[in-house]
Amino acid sequence: MTGERDPYERRFDAGTVLAALAAMIAVLMSIWYVALMAQEGGRPVAWFTGGLVGCAVLLAYGMVRTARRRGTALAIAGVVLIVLGYLALLSIGLPILVAGVLAVIAAAVTRR
């Protein structure tokens, strides 16, 4: 029975679900931020947009249960999202803060 998966093995754990929620929030907020800036006639700040997209990539990596340094990737994304959310707290920061907290919790519950 080598190479066969256990039919009762979970495909998702709590870290995966929390990372997926945080990634969805990060992607949606980056889209919303770019659309909001376009509506107001301004240009989105590259480092802020890059931070959101970079965190979404780290969270997507952290969703993989077998990924090496999964918890580290989730923790880094969480801390960066918390900082970005704090910086944008007066406009779009609250959902970003929530995503950061979810990512930190996901990092705490992962085993790898």
Image: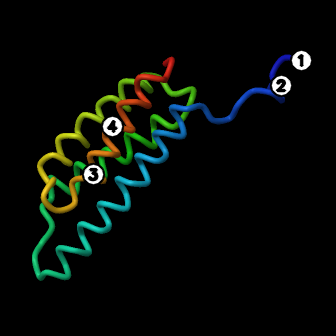
Question: Which labelled disc corresponds to residue 101?
Answer: 4
Is the residue marked by circle 1 packed among few (<14), some (14-19), or many (20+) residues within 10 Å?
Answer: few
On the picture, is 64 further left or further right than 108? right
On residue 24, which mark appears?
A: none
Q: Are marks 2 and 1 in contact (CB under 8 Å)?
A: yes
Q: Secondary structure at mark 1?
A: loop
Tell us which disc is closer to us: 2 or 4: 4
Please tell me which residue is depicted at 46% across the width and 47% down the height of the picture.
Answer: 21
Residue in the image at 37% along x and 62% along y: 28
Inter-mark Cα distance, 3 to 1: 43 Å
For mark 4, give the secondary structure. Answer: helix
**Residue 65's x, y, as percent?**
57, 29
Query: What amino acid does circle 4 point to?
Result: Val
The residue at which mark 3 appears reads as 52
Q: How are the colours assigned in the image?
A: rainbow
Q: Is residue 58 above or below residue 23?
A: above
N-terminal of the pair, mark 1 or mark 4, is 1
Q: Would you identify the image quadrant in which residue 72 lies? A: top left
State which tag comes first along the sequence, 3 or 1. 1
